[in-house]
Image (cartoon, helix red, strand yellow):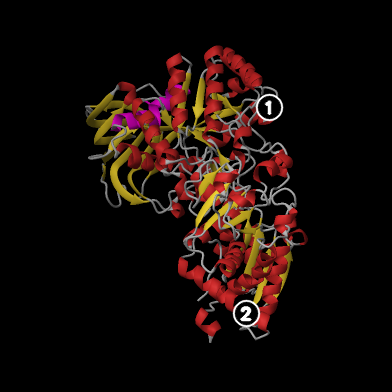
Amino acid sequence: MTNNLLGIRQLDIDQIETLLAIAADFKVRIIEGRPVPKITDKVVGMLFFEDSTRTRVSFEQAAHYLGLKTANFAAGASSMSKGETLKDTILTLRYERLDGLVIRHRMSGAPNLAARFFAGPVLNAGDGMHEHPTQALGDALTILERKEKIEGLRVAIVGDVEHSRVARSNAWLLTKLGASVNFVGPRTLMPPNSSLLPGRVYHDLEAGIDGADVIICLRLQRERMAEGLLSSSGEYAAMYQINQRNLAWAAPDCLVMHPGPINRGIEVDDFTADGDQSAITAQIENGIFVRMASLYWVFGGTVAEVMA
Amino acid sequence: MRTLLQNGRILDPAQNMDRIGSVLIENDQVVQVGDVELGNVPADEIYDCTGLWIAPGLVDPHVHLREPGSTHKEDIATGTQAAAAGGYTTICCMPNTNPPLDNPALVDFILDRSASPDAGGVFVAPVGALTRGMKGETLADLAAMKRAGIVAASDEEFPIQNANIMMRAMEFCVQLDLPIMAHCEDTNLSNRGSMNEGAMSAMLGLRGIPRSSEEIAIVRNGLLALHTGCRLHIMRVSTWGAVEMVRQLKFLGAPVTCEICPMHFALTEDMIGDFDTRYKTLPPLRTQIDIDLLLQGINDGTIDCIASDHSPHASYEVDVPFEEAPFGTAQLESSVAVTLTYLTHKGILSPLETIRKLSTAPASILRLEAGSLKPGDTPVAQVTVIDPNLEWTFDRDKTFSKSKNTPFHDFRLKGKSLLTFCGGEIYRDSMFGADRYQIVTSA
């Protein structure tokens, strides 16, 4: 049986727990130098239609550990730049006999379209403002390591929620596992109607992170200023930066996270980003193990096989 | 040639007629309506219309035929065939072709092509571009196009953003006695959005088109119409606020009318599901609250007529990421059935009011010689026979349109147009004669 990993919203709790359990096991094996199950007979296409360094490297590293071969596909160098549609590109890769696809695209829903025309599993490596499921899985694994369970945690997602696929995937995942989520940010960076998203909206940072066990900072894109959504990054930092002063509003052992790349001094100050409560580097490392788990899982791997 | 449509329910809003009776078509004219006296000459064909509606040929004020320029989506021949199958005898074609319909030579071209024998046999009333190239800058040659036969002017999907240019256009159109059809959208507010701004767009991570984008443009255009006296037909209203704004404009005495498309009263944004581009349309599908108040506006007459906004697109254009997909869907062959299913059978419109909104009202708004069964009212007989109770499943693979981008594929619908006459018979459903309905042919 094969699966797609298009978004967290469609996953049920069992599937999420399976993915996290496989990832945790892989992590221990890699760190202890023990072997992991190999998928040496498969080739996965890496389709990055949008610039990405960390996610791409992370997927490559995950594939490497699993013995999976990857076929790289840079949108600029491909036939997409000659006017080929995404559908035809996907069909081409299908009949190039690729076994799976990892796709990053600037348009929401592009991986859903790819899954319609590709025969094997499709993994979403971030699509527009929609979802970034492997980021959320990595973040969940990081939280689990520090907090032991997600159920009952109070999580604040701070920043540009409207334009953030990380915010959406994290909110789905953490609430499915029993956490409560606050979206915190200025009115202009919040969806006008968030009634179908699993979180409560706060515009005031103090209220939004009050007693929080986890704070996930979101990246602020510079183009938000050009779009008239914010006056300046300075004003944003003054209102929403996570720093030593306002971290006191959260729970004493509150974890601070950021999907990267960080604008130091804007979303989070230096001291907090590099401090004891920061889990930012752990997020990066765990990204590899959840991507290993995701690749393993979409090709039909089960927890039982891993544990065996 | 004498054709008798016998014993049907005659619905003719032009004569305020709703009665059981027959209609006699002789050669290409309706000659008797109601109690038909055949005299000594027998009818050549008698259609048994028991249980069926006999209505004036339907009128669609808003169709994209795509010719010239995009004949991979549709052309005048296939589009008019689809219209005939959908029960229409007169359709207005939109100017957003390539090149745009902004000069009299192209008007002649459209009229010639639609009159050719391989076309569907319906009347095509062209709508000319309001500004040259639909760029919203300088007026198109409206007087010359009016002489060539346009029935209205519109910049369609490229609405004029500069209010001063819109006002000048209206002033000129008052002089020409030419109505303006306006797609009302403030494109700064739409800001490259691809669906309704709301809970669904937030969940899917798609840029939203706010209701205010439509409503502000309706108010602006409506006030300009009030002050210039230009007849303004507001295309495809989709929000509860839009209906309320039109109601207020009419209350103020502005010369405005408006239309609604079947998608907007039948479907909500929820249909988009996981990025289904068959439900991407402009204005976007809204929510149930909007539909509830749109239905009220249809019922109380604020919304004057129903337009299909038939917008065919090729499959390869639609099988793309949602934001890349073009707006609009193929509609001509489902509009009547969707209207009956979602309005008539739900008690929103009486049968007579249904036909008014599908025929007599759009004909009157655009001053077309259509929308009436009264002998002599139209140049040739325009008659549509509808089975209001036939339940069927809409199948995109059995349509005449070149494009299959319908949102109603596999929908169970109740009501179907079966026969269309425009002069002669231009469409007969295969069920007629062969299967369900009787035709008596005199020896």
Name the image quarter holding residue A258. bottom right
Residue A67, percent from left and from top: 68, 81
Q: Nearer the viewer, residue B281 or B42?
A: B281
Labels 1, 2: one chain: no
Q: Is B38 left, or right, of B392 in this rendering?
A: left
Question: What residue is rendered at 52% in x and 37% in y?
Answer: B283
**Identity of the amino acid at label 1?**
Arg
Q: Is residue A181 magenta?
A: no
Residue A43 on image: x %, y %: 66, 76
The answer to whether residue B370 is magenta is yes
Please state the total of marks drawn on the protein image: 2
Q: Residue at x 51, y 46 (%)?
A: A194
Q: Say which of marks 1 and 2 sits in front.
A: 2
- The magenta span reads B351-373
Screen quadrant of the C terminus of chain B = top left
Residue B262: where, in percent of width, then height?
A: 42, 39
How far apart marks 1 and 2 lie (CA) works out to: 69 Å
The subunit letter for the residue under badge 2 reads A
Q: Is residue B391 above or below residue A71?
A: above
Q: Residues within 10 Å of mark 1 (few under 14, many from 20)?
A: some
- Give the secondary structure at mark 2: helix
Is A258 left, or right, of B58 in this rendering?
Answer: right
| Residue behind mark 1 | B132
